[in-house]
């Protein structure tokens, strides 16, 4: 049977491809602490369930392709509370942030086009680019510099006639980096100079720590016609399964093109949009409490990791991920070994292999992404398991050197 070159070129998800090993561990009776995926255990706001329960119609009809107006208005009001001036017509509802990102890439890229992305980056960016027959070109960043952007000259050297956009996650997944106003202004300057779009994945906007102030590309008022904003309720309201996101830009021509894609998939779930309206009515107190909880979890995980010999990591300033360099020959092999062979009192843990967050060959091989989405006591147990596993692993760097 024939398969397209497009689908064969796509990688499997580095975040999910080790799930069968975790399932096997569970079948053996082991408890697995999942630090591999950004699935929070925070309670979804009651407003979501109340909105769904109170929705009563005789027929659940198609929603409009752009999204229901009451949800678009709710999101517009949310953005304005952040001083981001999006009106209803600047916003289309999508099936999660993932569809918004794929729509953005398909709208601006022809086969062979390029997208500049700070590396390491969310693994599915590769998949979204490949779906449009485009490719990610990595912008190098360094853990020692908190994964902040390099100087403008470094970025501009990567620009070619095929470059269509600079694409950032802010706060960053998987790094937790929070870009400064100066960094964002630099990107705007580069984008204007080379006539590029700026794709802004800001789904972790609420999650910055230690008094770090968040600046959005949506605050760059002189670039709103080229800033493609992507958002989601998944992480902000701990509603990953709701699959409600949006794409927004102050550019009517761009939105006219995106509408073709929205119409092609008909609409987003009517019922989930009703629930999402409830989410955007959630009090600010909920988000403040969630922020405080994640900062506490970050501190717990960071403190535990600093106590493991040979582990190197930087304290992130946002989101809820940490990139960790471990003294192992291959992080994916190590995680697989841990799920198959290592347990403490019938418990083990799972991380995401770091190589999947890079497009540069051989980068991230000894790195893991850890998501601090579990309560503190579970993080303490998971780190203790990780410490013992590293000590026992046959492929420890020290063991290889010996």
Image (cartoon, rainbow, N blue to C red):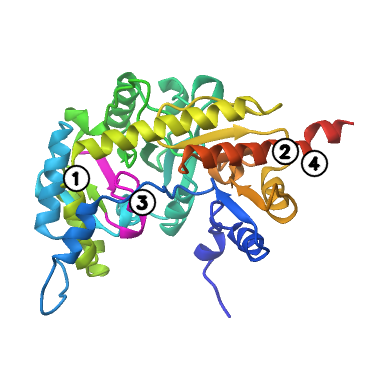
Which image quarter holds the N terminus? bottom right
Task: Report the magenta residues as a range.
Answer: 225-244
- Choose the circle earlier in sequence order: 2 or 4: 2
The reply, left or right, for residue 295 in relation to residue 77 is right
Q: Secondary structure at mark 2?
A: helix
Q: Give the labeled residue for mark 4.
A: 395
- Residue at the image position 61 percent from the left and 37 percent from the top: 383
* CA distance separating discs 1 and 3: 37 Å
* CA distance separating discs 2 and 4: 14 Å
- Choose the circle earlier in sequence order: 1 or 2: 1
Is 235 within the magenta?
yes
Query: Which of these two is toward me, 371 or 68?
Result: 371
- Residue at the image position 16 percent from the left and 60 percent from the top: 51
Write down the quadrant of residue 132 in the picture.
Answer: bottom left
Q: Give the labeled residue for mark 3.
A: 109
Q: Give the labeled residue for mark 2.
A: 388
* CA distance separating discs 4 and 3: 42 Å
């Amino acid at each position: 049977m024939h398969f397209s070159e497009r689908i064969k070129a796509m990688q499997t998800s580095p975040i999910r491809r080790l799930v069968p090993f975790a399932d096997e561990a569970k079948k053996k009776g082991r408890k697995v602490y999942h630090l591999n995926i950004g699935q929070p255990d925070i309670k979804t706001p009651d407003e979501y369930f109340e909105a769904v329960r109170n929705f009563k119609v005789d027929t659940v009809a198609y929603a409009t392709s752009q999204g229901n107006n009451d949800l678009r208005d709710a999101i517009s009001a949310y953005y304005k509370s952040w001083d981001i001036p999006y009106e209803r017509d600047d916003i289309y509802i999508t099936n999660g942030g993932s569809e918004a990102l794929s729509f953005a890439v398909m709208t601006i890229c022809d086969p062979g086009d390029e997208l500049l992305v700070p590396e390491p980056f969310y693994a599915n960016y590769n998949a979204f680019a490949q779906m449009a027959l485009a490719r990610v070109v990595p912008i190098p960043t360094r853990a020692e510099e908190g994964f902040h952007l390099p100087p403008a000259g470094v970025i501009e050297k990567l620009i070619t006639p095929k470059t269509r956009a600079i694409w950032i996650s802010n706060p960053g997944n998987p790094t937790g980096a929070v870009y400064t106003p100066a960094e964002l202004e630099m990107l705007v300057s580069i984008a204007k100079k080379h006539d590029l779009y700026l794709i802004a994945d800001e789904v972790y906007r609420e999650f910055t720590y230690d008094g770090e102030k968040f600046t959005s590309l949506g605050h760059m008022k002189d670039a709103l016609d080229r800033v493609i904003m992507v958002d989601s309720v998944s992480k902000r309201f701990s509603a990953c399964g709701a699959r409600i996101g949006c794409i927004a830009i102050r550019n009517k021509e761009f939105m006219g093109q995106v509408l073709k894609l929205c119409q092609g998939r008909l609409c987003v779930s009517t019922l989930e949009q009703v629930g999402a309206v409830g989410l955007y009515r959630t009090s600010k107190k909920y988000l403040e409490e969630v922020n405080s909880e994640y900062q506490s979890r970050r501190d717990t995980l960071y403190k535990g990791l600093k106590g493991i010999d040979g582990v190197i990591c930087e304290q992130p300033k946002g989101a809820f991920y940490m990139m960790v360099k471990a003294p192992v020959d291959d992080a994916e092999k190590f995680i697989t070994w841990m799920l198959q062979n290592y347990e403490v009192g019938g418990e083990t843990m799972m991380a995401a292999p770091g190589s999947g967050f890079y497009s540069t060959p051989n980068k991230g091989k000894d790195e893991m992404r850890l998501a601090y989405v579990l309560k503190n006591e579970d993080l303490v147990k998971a780190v203790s398991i990780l410490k013992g596993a590293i000590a026992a692993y046959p492929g420890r760097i020290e063991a290889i050197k010996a």
